[in-house]
Amino acid sequence: MNIANFRSMCGCALVFSFLAPAVAIATPAAQGAMTGMAAANKIVAAWPERPRLGAHQMLAKYGAPHEITAKQLVWHKVGAFKRITVYNLETPHDFPLPHVDYLEHTIEYNVPQEKVADLIRFDASSTINRTVGELSARCDLEGHNILTLNLDHDIVTGKKTVEQARIAFGEIVEQDVTAKHPPYVEALQFQPAKALTAAFSDVPIIPGSPVRMADVDVDAKGANAAKKMPDAEVLSTVIAVDLNEVLAAAEATKKKISAPVMDYAKMLHAAHGENMVKAMKLGQKIGVTPIDTMAVDKMKIKGAGELAALVLLDGAAFERSYIDLMVKGHTEVIAMIDSKLLKVAQAAPLKAFLTQTRSQIVANLDLAKKLQITQKR
């Protein structure tokens, strides 16, 4: 065991009010901690010995975890770490010598794409999530996870090669077990990234795909980009509407519903999916990249909220709610096309596309109303 880790196990204490005349009363925060500690200790009592040891070490050092399940304990934003997780799982790992992994430390970190393979070659127990901007190390000791992260940073910054880092790992572990307290085991030797700054959302790969408003530099592209902004938002709005309908229809096809409603859902899935593809191709044709503005993002959020209310239903209850939503949604889209989209769209091909889209939505609405009437009989 890392001696520094052992010393730090004694840092957990309950906070009491010394003003009580006879009985010490825990503060609300301490009461919550005690409840969490009790629940965590009860859970890990049934775990295998080694993960239980790791759990007790982290409980002693960091107090009650923020998440407790039969499979894991999780702490968020403790020490220098974004997250610490102890798993009720033993994974054999032979680097630098045979042991089992069950303890994971995660930091905010932007791993460059060209360094991802190097970090995995260095220690295959590392986990890299470039989208979120996270780097995790998994081992059986906190000090060894800190060591892994420090050497990861050395590889990323070019201070060490993969081979040099693997040799250094073994040498530093030897120093650690002989009580030399190497700094690379004691603490991170660098400052983790600030929240979200390490995130990498990647880039769209589907031709004609919308881009986020935050990724658009209108000033750099000049007045021409600003002039195309209305059409860019209109295209993105249509794509968002189509995608919301596709997701709802896909959910409907998983349910136990009548044949007429199932057929309607399948028709909507195909029709809106095809219209979405047409919108993206149109943008390419007229030289306009769809842009997800705040208004477009709100539409996506609204669609997710409405679908979230549906997914727990099935059978007749789902049918009624789904058709009611289709009537409401298609009615709102027609009104939006008439009152806004057709008025702000500038390119003639886009106006023609909106008119065509409107006709299809009217037809879809008529079918939904007929199904709605049938359901009420």
Image (spheres, rainbow, N blue to C red):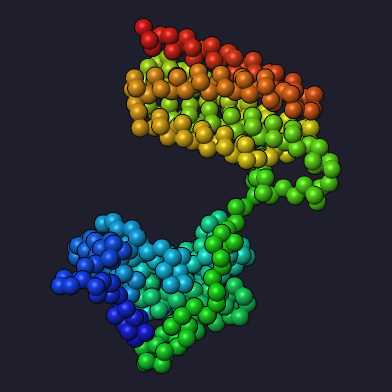
Q: Residue at x 35, y 32 (%)?
A: 312
In the displayed structure, 163 sits above or below 178; it is: above
Q: Residue at x 80, y 51 (%)?
A: 220
Quadrant, the C terminus: top left
Q: Residue at x 48, y 29 (%)?
A: 248
Return the x and y of residue 25 as percentages of the image width and height: 21, 67
Q: In this view of the protein, can residue 261 be seen by the observer? A: yes
- Relative to 274, 247 lies left or right: left
- Relative to 111, 228 lies left or right: right
Q: Residue at x 36, y 76 (%)?
A: 141
Return the x and y of residue 127 as percentages of the image width and height: 47, 63
Q: Which picture quadrant has residue 254?
A: top left
Which sits in the foreground, 265 or 44? 44
Extreme residue toward the right, this view: 223
In the displayed structure, 167 sits above or below 78; it is: below
Q: Which picture quadrant has residue 159?
A: bottom right
Q: In this view of the protein, can residue 100 be seen by the observer? A: no
Return the x and y of residue 310 as percentages of the image width and height: 40, 29
Return the x and y of residue 282 as percentages of the image width and height: 73, 30
Quadrant, the N terminus: bottom left
